[in-house]
Image: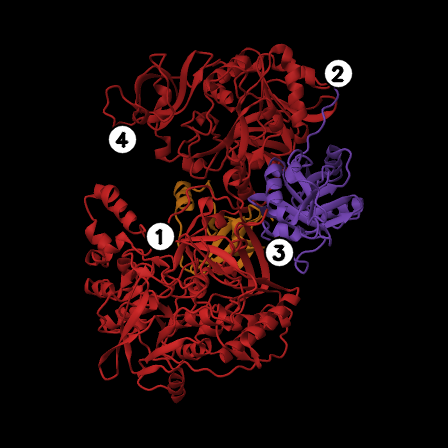
Amino acid sequence: MSDPMPNPRFAFAGHLTAIGSLVAGAGITLMPKDDLALATVIARKGQAGVLGERVQALFGIPLPARPKRAAAGKIAFIGTGPGQWLAIEESSGDPQSFAAKLATEFAGSGSVCDQSDGRAVIRVSGPRARHVLAKGLPVDLHPRAFGPGDAALSQIALISTLLWQIDEAPTYEIAVFRSMAGSFADWLIASGAEYGIAAMS
Amino acid sequence: MTPLPQSRRLASGGLIDRSRTLSFQFDGKPMTGHPGDTLASALIANGTILAGRSFKYHRPRGILTAGSEEPNALVELRSGARREPNTKATTVELFDGLVARSQNRWPSLGFDVMSVNSLLSPIFVAGFYYKTFMWPAAFWEKLYEPLIRRAAGLGRASREPDPDSYEKAFAFCDVLVIGGGPTGLMAALSAARAGAHVILCDEDFSFGGRLLSEQFVIDGQSGADWKAAAVFELEQNPAVTLMRRTTVFGGYDQSTYGALERVGDHLPVPLPHMPRQRLWKIVAKRAVLAAGAVERQIVFGGNDRPGVMMASALRSYVNRFAAAPAQRLGLFTNNDDGWKTVADCIRAGIKVEAVIDPRPAIPEAFRQLAIQAGARLFEGGLVQDAHGTARGLQSIDVMTSTGRTESVAVDGLAVSGGWNPAVALTCHLGARPVWRDDISAFVAGDTPPGLVVAGAATGAFDLRSCLADGVRLGAEAAQAAGFTAVAPTVPAASEETLGLMPLWKVTGARTKAFVDFQNDVTAKDIVIAEREGFRSVEHLKRYTTLGMATDQGKTANVNGLAIMAALTGRSIPETGTTTFRPPYTPVAIGAFAGHHRGKHFRPTRLTPSHAWAAEQGAQFVEAGQWLRAQWFPKPGETDWLTSVNREVIAVRGAVGVCDVSTLGKIDIQGADAGTLLDRVYINGFSALPVGKVRYGAMLREDGIVMDDGTTARLAQDRYVMSTTTANAAKVMQHLEFCHQVLWPELDVQMVSVTEQWAQFSIAGPRARDTIQKLIDPMADVSNMALPYMGVTTITVCGGIPGRLFRISFSGELAYELAVPARYGDGVIRAIMSAGAEYGIVAYGTEALGVMRIEKGHPAGNELNGTATARDLGLGKLMSQKKDFIGRVMAERSGLTNPDRPSLAGFVPVNRADRLRAGAHFLGLGAHPSASNDQGYMTSVAFSPSLSHWVGLGLIKNGPNRHGERVRAYDPVRRGDIEVEICSPVFIDPEGGRLRV
Amino acid sequence: MQIECPFCGKRDAHEFAYLGDATVARPDPAVPDAARAFYEYVYLRDNPAGSHRELWYHSAGCHSWLVVTRDTRTHAIETIAQVGAR
């Protein structure tokens, strides 16, 4: 117990180093989002309305009934299924406490699970972001079909993914199961290499 | 060697870039060409007539077509690891440094020993495989097949791994236009002008289709200029995606199309990071099929001789590529379209020696054209035989309208038997084409929803109709996709006529007349098939192999069908239809695999302690998608068993740690969580106290065990279930089924938390001592506070929140410590240093397996999809007080019979013997037969605790036969030993060690 | 093939897992002839050429169980609906 608390090891650690030097004018920029607190929230039977009111009251966010991302400040909710959401807190210093806080606030109306470590999130942006994603995602990301605030649950290269769009740059964030982060990074790098990839930490 | 000049290159014209010269080699001979050439056009420009030999008879063959329908000119392209057989010279885009070799010849293309096959042709006729090589069976493998393989073949594949990469991609559009000829270009323009998102694909490297190959005039411009303007307009429109070198090869359900883009095939090697090919899945709201038509042959004697070429292909070589396939040409056409060849030859300075047109009367304009060309005209005439050698054509025998035979000296013969619309894509979902008498061709029958056919693919064989079709159908497709089309204007083009008189086969040929060039099927083969009763299209095809080669009979099928129709006195539609399955042209397996080859065959899942385990030099094993540490060799350990024995002894004697994060974990919350678990598990969970863990087994509805694991109650309304590693996703799907489909009234919320937690098993007599050093003060993990099968929440290592389960798979005092996965790496390092003073070891899946076998825990090998709960000794868990999935069916007499193979332990009577999993049990002295089979050994391990092998197995009435001896019979590995049946629990049967 | 998930939208069929007949219902285990009823529920299936109600699971998406009414001859999909609890 005299030892200090061990450092965390994030899911993409060691998987994004092999993509070479930062290419000037890279078509794609990758950035792992290690500072997100994530929690799944599922409405209790018949309590979706109550849950929605709680979320609105606490965060000023209308709970999306579709695969959409609704955000205010550091908090966002993404619809991941009927009566199910992924709650996100940006720049979270203490990811476990986010789920704990939601669990307390939603007691009786929503079941909450910490997933801050269960999902690894990576930000994919740049002028060729759409091109690289088209090599794996069977979802139309053209601006007329998909824009900021839209989300999709699907799979890329046989890996389950939850993707949402942040802005029109375009910037996307993609959550995959933590254990698959390495394989997902391999696919991203293989598919994006022709456009040039810059990685940020 | 310096390349010879391009002797057959026309002095001017063509859509080639004469400012640049490309060098290439064919059969070792250096040659040159220009950008814009195909390999075939460059060969022709270099005066090469002979392109390969045929598959069966090794007959010399030339270039027949100028497109993807080519049956003859198949070559091996490139060399070394990139060597690719059966590429069509007619579609290979010439690049600098290209190396190609002809196929099916030995020792050389000009002199081929196997062409003797042609003399043996009586034995190579239709059905020869079936008739000649029927028995004895062993002869097939040892004699016939090697012989045939050497004699016949379709090129040699490289035996090295493919050095190129492939990828898959998805595209979405309002209107997909398939084919970039005049119809497709017009359809794309029309749809794009309405605002639709359009994808236009063409298999060629240049858009334009026949506009590139004919002397068309559109709106007063040349066809090529009009095409350039159209492509420019499309390129300027951001809503249009132009895909050259892209073949739409398949049409699938709900308007989904498969397409292959040849990204780097036109380069010597793909550029860095460039895939060689890309497989597209295109989802289109509407699709316009403008794939054009394929010119068909006329079957006559020697119609496969080098120098015989489709008339449209000849015009392609002359007009598009400025290459002259012949200098003294004959033309054999039964339609007006073929006559275009005469005018083009006059323009190019190619002498037309004769025109043979079987029609009794032809338009006066053509007569004048023949006079202008100085050609002899045989109205009502037929070409009966073509004569020549491997070096080219020498003469043709013409039967005149009066019945005389005349020989005409020619070095080339252009043939047009009419056109077959390219309707393959309309058939991919099961529809069949229908016959149209007015054009003597099959056209699309029912089309799949969302697909329309346009232009020549509908049988509209004139440019004016094609352009009008494109305008109209492009606009309609855009409208159907929700856009408003602008008023259509159709470009002006001159009128054309077809005037076809059907002619499939010339009678009276004295030499071999071919129907299917690539598979060497002759007209006579069809006669034999008819004679022997193979008259249906499907039988004809399989008996003669008509249409079964890599070109799928694009130039053969309809002629074959027509010949059969004539033989049987039926009409063509009565005889049958040709139909098509994907792919339209061959697609490399690599393109279907895309990224998923080698180590990327499927995603690999890494455990939270993976990086640490790799540092320790762990040996890894694939467990489903997971990569798990199998054992941790120490320096000096060269044998896996030494490492595993050491790990097991250390756990049983001191303490060990194993990453068990791969087990599935499902968080189950809600007021009815316990009720759901009661219905899913054979035993009860709603009465499990908070803070306790229970082992449970679940069945399929048919009464067979599906999975097992422990479930802990964290709160009144919250459980966490563990599943086996292999079944995690399946159990989640099952629980969702139970909740959503069977019992939607329950208040239950479930989510997988497998990946959230790094979970470590810490097992052995010093496990608690080790744990004590990790957990933060205040937590009490004494046997009193946290007894066997208890669970508590704690913090470790100075504040990391975790869960501590007192559960054991090894049979020792053991805990499973769960921490957020990001801390898995740090915590395993902390566990190793905390346990160092007790001699802690890291152990892998092998030691885990040894210890569970020693404890008699069933696992994957025992949960084999046939075992019931009773078979596995879990019968006493089956609740009598409640219903659960599989309860009713588990009571079937067949599943409750005590004679069923059920779980027992096994030890070798001679303790030195090794046990083998998979060995079958027989009574002592019983004959090894299926009827004497009593079951089999499911799992074995060398037990370092007992110093001999132990096994688990499923044997008839196992629990009641402890002490009995049986044979463990393993003929595959020559195992046949005596074993004794015993309790499956080899270590600590009372379980005292678990509870200390 | 494309299947329009009521929650996620139109998706490739690869995202879905097929179970089969949606017209059978789990019998009441308390009825006297439960053994026969379960036998039929587990094993007996019609195999219609034409319209068929089927259970599909959006395994790579929202994890919804769906009832898809599909023509087994043409793969044309008539209706798609969430099942049960959702």
The hue used for chain B is red
Against B523, residue A114 (above or below) is above
Q: SS for tag 2?
A: loop
Q: Circle 2 sits on which residue?
A: A2
Q: Position of residue B711 (x, y in %)?
A: 57, 29
Q: Residue at x 71, y 52 (%)?
A: A170
Q: Quadrant of the C terminus of chain B?
A: top right
Q: CA distance from mark 4 to mark 3?
A: 56 Å
Q: Position of residue B920 (x, y in %)?
A: 32, 25
Dot 1 or dot 4, earlier in sequence: 1
**Relative horizontal placement of residue A6, taking residue B547 as reference (left or right):** right
Q: Badge 3: how crowded within 10 Å, few (<14), some, or many (20+)? A: many
| CA distance for labels 1 and 2 | 73 Å
In the displayed structure, B539 sits above or below B194; it is above
Q: Earlier in the sequence, mark 3 or mark 2?
A: 2
Q: Is residue B846 left or right of residue B654?
A: left
Labels 4 and 2 in the same subunit? no
Q: Secondary structure at mark 3?
A: loop
Q: Which residue is mark 3?
A: A140
Query: Which quarter of the figure has residue B586?
Result: bottom left
Do dots 1 and 4 share one subunit? Answer: yes
Q: Which chain is purple?
A: A
Tell me the tag on residue B154. Answer: 1
Could you give the CA–CA distance between mark 4 and mark 2, rounded to whole angstroms? Answer: 65 Å
